[in-house]
Image (spheres, helix red, strand yellow):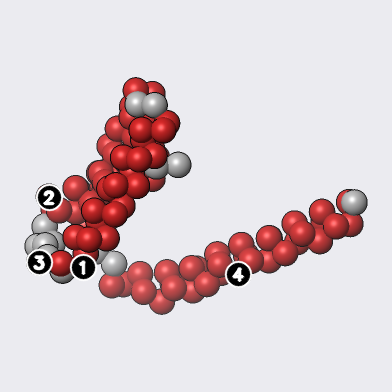
Amino acid sequence: MQGAVGFGLALVVVVLLLAMSTAGFMVAREWRFADARGLVWILSGRLDGALGGVGLLALIPAGFLSMLFGGLVLAAVLASLARPKIPLRNGTRLAGGVASGVMGTAGR
């Protein structure tokens, strides 16, 4: 039994290490082109959104939350099909970060 679990764990670890090394190479190659100021706006929105997501988890029943987030994902897919022109400003970066934080925290 331990041999099977150890082999399975090794398969998972190899995939994770490969993904991390690939991401590391991408960061090393592309870091000069990153928008540091934009990243600050996005990450601050993400933090606020994560706090809001924790609040949603505490206040809304899990079944309703699943339906709500399923509807939000469907709405986002339909909106992306319309291909709206969204200007890249600090407000839209912040809003995207908040949406990411809420969906990433409460959508689990």
Q: Residue at x 89, y 51 (%)?
A: 2
Whether residue 43 can be seen here: no
Question: Is label 4 in a helix, a strand or a loop?
Answer: helix
Residue denoted by label 2: 91
Which residue sits at x=42%, y=69%? 27
Residue sitting at 33 percent across and 29 percent down? 56
Type of the residue with mark 3: Lys
Give me the disc on residue 18: 4
Q: Residues within 10 Å of mark 4 (few under 14, many from 20)?
A: few
Q: Toward which corner of the image does residue 81 lie, by quadrant?
A: bottom left
Picture disc at residue 85: 3
SS under mark 2: helix
Q: Position of residue 21 (x, y in %)?
A: 56, 69
Look at the image and tell me whether residue 2 can be seen.
yes
Indicate which disc, 4 or 1, sits on the residue closer to the N terminus: 4
Identify which residue, 81 or 15, lies in the foreground: 81
Q: Nearer the viewer, mark 2 or mark 3?
A: 3
Earlier sequence position, callout 1 versus callout 2: 1
Q: Disc 2 or 3, which lies upstream in sequence?
A: 3
Alpha carbon of mark 2 to alpha carbon of mark 3: how far?
Answer: 15 Å
Reading the image, the residue beneath label 1 is 81
Tell me: 91 left or right of 62. left
Answer few, some or many: residues within 10 Å of disc 3's Cα (few below 14, many 20 plus, some between 14 and 19). Answer: few
Q: How far apart in space, not on screen, are marks 1 and 2 (Cα)?
A: 22 Å
Give the spatial CA distance, label 2 vs label 4.
Answer: 35 Å
Q: Earlier in the sequence, mark 2 or mark 4?
A: 4
Q: In 3D space, how far apart are the residues under numbered discs 3 and 4 (Cα atoms)?
A: 36 Å
Q: Nearer the viewer, residue 6 or 83?
A: 83
